[in-house]
Image (tube, rainbow, N blue to C red):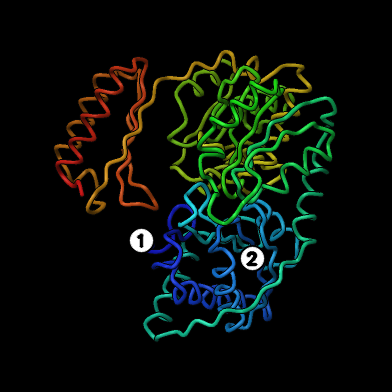
Amino acid sequence: MAKQLFGTDGIRGVAGEYPLDPATVFAFGVALGRDAVGAQAGAEILIGADTRESGPWIAEMVAGGLEQAGARARYAGVITTPGVAYLTRTGPFLAGVMISASHNPYRDNGIKVFGHSGFKLPDAEEHAIEQEIFRLLAAGVAPRPAKLTADPSLDRQYLAYLVSTAAVRFDGVKLAIDCGNGASYRLAPDLFRQLGAETATLCAEPNGRNINLDCGALDLKGLRQAVIEQQADFGVAFDGDADRAIFVARSGKIVDGDAAMLISARALHAAGHLTGDTLVATVMSNLGLERALERDGIHMVRTPVGDKYVLEEMVRRGAALGGEQSGHVIFREYATTGDGLLTALRIFEIAGRAGRGLDELTADLCVYPQRLVNVRVRDKKGLTELPSVAREIARVEQAFGGAGRVLVRFSGTEPLARVMVEGPDMEQVETFSARIAEAIRREMGA
């Protein structure tokens, strides 16, 4: 049976509304607590949050549910998602909960769950927790929040770990850092200052409502301007929970997750550390990345969208590197999830050792024109059930003749069909994506 609450990245919605209303959040805490206590009496669960104004009350509702189930909650306060994953797998915690909606606006929030392994929960366990939540709601569970006090030692432990992975210092390097008014607002500047870099920090004054607002990994205008005006060697922007990073080269060129994976894969391959000469990416990664990797004898494997699925395939293959175009990059030697701060460390290290900037390291990456169209839909019928849509997709694929790609999928968190068309000619890409989107709109548009 398909999951109803958990999407590709946990439970997400508008804070205060179902499924992030107090009763459902509390029921989640009870369900997770029962699951944990069933495995270990008195289990301790870590909770962290980004900077949204709804984070504290959601964390307290989760903690109240955990305590009712006989589990104990420990609160890290504001910390990144990969920070929660690291602390969960290295500490005494049976599970970790991150309160965040990643790159979404402040009104949204979400709940991500990690097991003690540091991996996000498997689908079967998420489904079991969902069923317990529904049982509790049907029984009329009464939400009772638990007061929480943040333990300031926890994010320091994570920061110390990041510093310990650094193989070089960044003395004399000038960095522009956009924290997106999110979870990295203290950690990112501290990390690179400890390693000797000169930092110019942007958007590090969260007020609960300005997370991701005209800044961060999805809006690079401010960072790009800062890099150029201040002649910074590198720029990096993080999203709200800092599990992704997007870079700006000295010239102002945007360096996305695909380019970061190319830089990293080549460095690991040259050092003999790219297991199986394989990079794991998603269906959204650009054909240009695949072609560039092929020239270096590196094979790219694609998965469905979601770093969870990238990681599952990495584990299956024993791969060392994987990620997404959006900026999630997973270095399995160091982490079990995408980590923006860790990615920035690795990218800046590679550039420093090579004595080259991001412009030079990505100069031969030819990015194919790509168009993504979102179509709001009434429901999420299988596209194979819609002959007119299937025919339009087939026509486009035939016209490309292997020189382009078509991907049509449903969003895991919103009532949207996403149409992605990629090929060598932008005009053709625009025309084909519009045709497929219109066919979907006719059949199931909201």
Residue 401 vs residue 37: left or right?
left
The front one of 318 and 257 is 257
What whole-number distance in Å separates the C-alpha atoms at marks 2 and 1?
27 Å
The front one of 21 and 322 is 21
Residue 179 quadrant: top right
In this figure, which residue is indicated by the disc labeled 1? 2
Q: Amino acid at mark 1?
A: Ala
Coordinates of residue 361 in the picture (x, y in percent): 65, 18
Instruction: Name the residue at 54% across, 35% down.
Output: 280
| Relative height, residue 56 to residue 262 (above, below) | below
Few, some or many residues within 10 Å of mark 1 (<14, 14–19, 20+): few
Coordinates of residue 440 in the picture (x, y in percent): 20, 40
Instruction: Name the residue at 72% across, 58% down.
Output: 87
Q: Amino acid at mark 2?
A: Ile
Instruction: Name the residue at 68% across, 53% down.
Output: 83
Tell me which label, 2 or 1, sits earlier in the chain: 1
Marks 2 and 1 close (CB-CB < 8 Å): no
Coordinates of residue 228 in the picture (x, y in percent): 64, 21
Q: Nearer the viewer, mark 2 or mark 1?
A: 2
| Circle 1: element type | loop
Query: Where residue 359 is drawn, which disc sits there?
Result: none
Few, some or many residues within 10 Å of mark 2 (<14, 14–19, 20+): many
The front one of 292 and 65 is 65
Residue 397 quadrant: top left
| Circle 2: element type | strand
In this figure, which residue is indicated by the disc labeled 2? 47
The front one of 378 and 330 is 378
Q: Quadrant of the N terminus?
A: bottom left
Residue 443 quadrant: top left
| Relative height, residue 173 to residue 379 (above, below) | above
| Relative height, residue 138 to residue 228 (above, below) | below
Residue 100 vs residue 360: left or right?
left
